[in-house]
Image: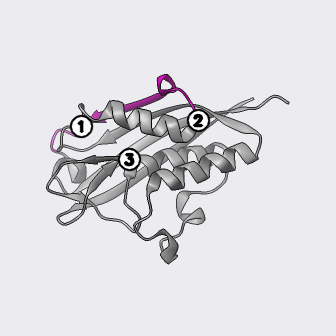
């Protein structure tokens, strides 16, 4: 049996924060504002995995009201979500994610993002797609005030 989930995350871009996407520290004058390291890519993928098995969202498992998650590495949170998937008898099938931001340009970083996500999800990098798109100057992703990520994931039932 195969199930699918959709994930979304968005963060404000502000000065004085690092921009981390898929575990990659992207050089830029602004970073994502959030309780954890604000890795919108890891968050969207985690939400897609949780959604595939109707397990709620990332905030339900790692609330920003809990100080344990302050500045947490989002790849660690993603790995915990993968564990939840495995505990229910499933494995990650594939992931497709789209980062929407005008700047910085991300093409030189997407391969490392793919590899980082694949390693945390226990799949080959060929099962992970990360794309970066601009929104042609429109909205918060186009005016430089925010970043958004959409993700879809499949999970497959592990046969006994």
Residue 131 showing in the rendered view:
no
| Total marks placed | 3
First of labels 3, 2 by sequence position: 3
**Label number found at residue 23:** 3
Name, please, the residue furthest toward the right.
Answer: 160
Asked whether 6 or 17 is in front, the reply is 17
Name the image quarter holding the C terminus: top right
Q: Percent x, y for residue 81?
A: 60, 51
- For the point 52% across and 76% down, which residue is it? 66
Per the image, the residue denoted by label 1 is 106
Q: Residues within 10 Å of mark 1 (few under 14, many from 20)?
A: some
Q: Earlier in the sequence, mark 3 or mark 1?
A: 3
Quadrant of res 114: top left
- Tell whether 71 sits left or right of 60: left
Q: Relative to residue 94, is residue 58 depicted above or below?
A: below
Q: Which residue is mark 2?
A: 122
């Amino acid at each position: 049996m195969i199930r699918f989930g959709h994930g979304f995350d968005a963060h404000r871009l502000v000065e004085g924060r690092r921009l981390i996407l898929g575990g990659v520290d992207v050089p830029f004058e602004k970073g994502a504002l959030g309780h954890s390291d604000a890795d919108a890519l890891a968050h969207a993928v985690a939400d897609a995995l949780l959604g595939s098995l109707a397990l709620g969202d990332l905030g339900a498992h790692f609330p920003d009201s809990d100080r344990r998650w302050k500045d947490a590495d989002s790849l660690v949170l993603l790995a915990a979500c993968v564990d939840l998937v495995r505990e229910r008898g499933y494995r990650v099938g594939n992931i497709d994610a789209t980062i929407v931001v005008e700047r910085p340009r991300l093409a030189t970083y997407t391969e490392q993002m793919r590899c980082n996500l694949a390693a945390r999800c226990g799949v080959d990098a060929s099962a992970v797609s990360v794309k970066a798109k601009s929104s042609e100057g429109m909205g918060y992703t186009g005016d430089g005030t925010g970043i958004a990520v959409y993700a879809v994931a499949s999970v497959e039932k592990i046969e006994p």
